[in-house]
Image: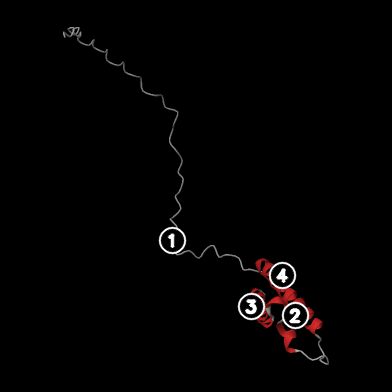
Amino acid sequence: MYPLLIVLTILAAVLLIGVVLIQKSKGGGLSSSFAGSNQVLGVRRTNSFIEKLTWSLAGAICVLAILSTFFMPRAIVNKARVASPAPVEQTQGGNFDTKAPAATPAPAAQPAAPVAPAAPESK
């Protein structure tokens, strides 16, 4: 279904391009080639038809684009280029209820040598 929706979207887009190219800016377009008053499609009918066709094709492209998102195939998860790492087995942990070792007392800090006062500066 997805490829069919894509083909229909492309077909509608190509037709929309053709319809827009047929139109002339400022409202002339295909109607300007029908200058006589005895044609089957009058000037007003031609503009109305091409305008309706333009809006219809634009709407069809929008609807087909939304539908294609619903019918888009899902991503394949198992097809990776990089091999996944081997699973790591969880083993039963050891006995973690052991007592902490007794703390050894820190050595006493030795007093620092006294610093002689500085002599006053003379000027």
**Figure colour scheme:** secondary structure
Q: Secondary structure at mark 4?
A: helix
What residue is disc 2 on?
Answer: 50
Residue 4 in percent (x, y) is at 66, 77
- Which quadrant does the N terminus fall into? bottom right
Horizontal arrangement in the rendering, residue 73 relative to residue 97 (left or right):
right
Nearer the observer: mark 1 or 3; the answer is 3
Q: Secondary structure at mark 1?
A: loop
- Which quadrant does the C terminus fall into? top left
Crowding near pointer 2: few (<14 within 10 Å), some, many (20+)? Answer: some
Say which amino acid is labelled 1.
Ala
Crowding near pointer 3: few (<14 within 10 Å), some, many (20+)? Answer: some
Say which amino acid is labelled 2.
Ile
Q: How many marks?
A: 4
What residue is disc 3 on?
Answer: 10
Nearer the observer: mark 4 or 1; the answer is 4
Say which amino acid is labelled 3.
Ile
Q: Secondary structure at mark 2?
A: helix
Of 66 and 80, nearer the camera is 66
Rendering quarter of residue 120 = top left
Chain-order first, disc 1 or disc 2: 2
Horizontal arrangement in the rendering, residue 12 relative to residue 117 (left or right):
right
Q: CA distance from mark 1 to mark 3?
A: 38 Å
Rendering quarter of residue 117 = top left
Chain-order first, disc 4 or disc 3: 3
